[in-house]
Amino acid sequence: MTRGYISIGSNINKDEHVPASLQALEQTFGELTISSVYESEPVGFTGDVFYNLVVGFDSNLEVKAVAKQLRQIELDNGRTRDSRKFAARTLDLDLILYGDLIVNDGRLQIPRDEIEHYAFVLEPLAEIAPDLKHPIIHISYAELWEQFDKNDLKQKRITPSWSSVK
């Protein structure tokens, strides 16, 4: 079994798409470790706020099969493949870690750069996997979050209306 982590984001019908994604992920991978939900300002464009969170899961699938499952869940939730990087979206599921795997194969990059660059990925990851170490720089996610520049932090932990999550 390999432990993986998925970053989840949505700013279009987020109260519908985030819970639907959690249900689909649980049906696909079984029990999930779910971070708090964070409300975050969009990065790189102007738009509605996002809900962001990170989930941990265990799987025996090859990494590309996991990525394919995530793409299907996105499509099932109205995501279109022509969406730009910095744009509103119904659902964004990014496989950010998969064991100690290091992959840089076109669109599949693990660990994702976003871990170190965006609070909306790092904070929820540090919440559910504080002692886990980044497979390249070998620093724990709790330490990375502690060192993260929080001067312009535009996110807060929330309890969404649908949430039985923390």
Image (cartoon, helix red, strand yellow):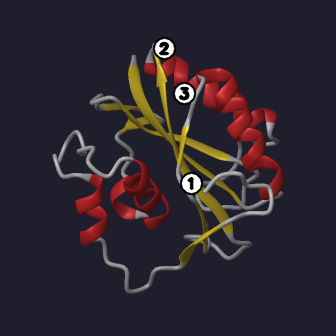
Residue 144: percent from the left, percent from the top? 26, 61
Tell me the number on the disc at residue 53.
1
Residue 41: percent from the left, percent from the top? 61, 74
Query: Counting residues from the N terminus, which is met first, the one under dot 3 or under dot 2?
Result: 2
Query: Which residue carries the number 2 mark?
Result: 61
Circle 1 residues within 10 Å: few <14, some 14–19, many ≥20: many
Q: Is there a contact, CB below 8 Å, between mark 2 and mark 1?
A: no
Query: Which residue carries the number 3 mark?
Result: 67
Circle 3 residues within 10 Å: few <14, some 14–19, many ≥20: some
* Residue lying at 69% horizontally and 49% vertically, measured from the top left: 83
Residue 80: percent from the left, percent from the top? 76, 42
Query: Counting residues from the N terminus, which is met first, the one under dot 3 or under dot 1?
Result: 1
Q: Residue furthest bottom?
A: 151
Q: In this view, does 121 lie to the left or right of 12?
A: left
* Residue lying at 43% horizontally and 32% vertically, measured from the top left: 4
In which image quadrant can residue 151 be found? bottom left
Name the secondary structure under disc 1.
strand
Number of numbered discs overlaid on the protein picture: 3
The amino acid on which the numbered mark 1 sits, given as a three-letter code, is Leu
Q: Quadrant of the C terminus?
A: bottom right
Q: In this view, does 61 lie to the left or right of 15?
A: left
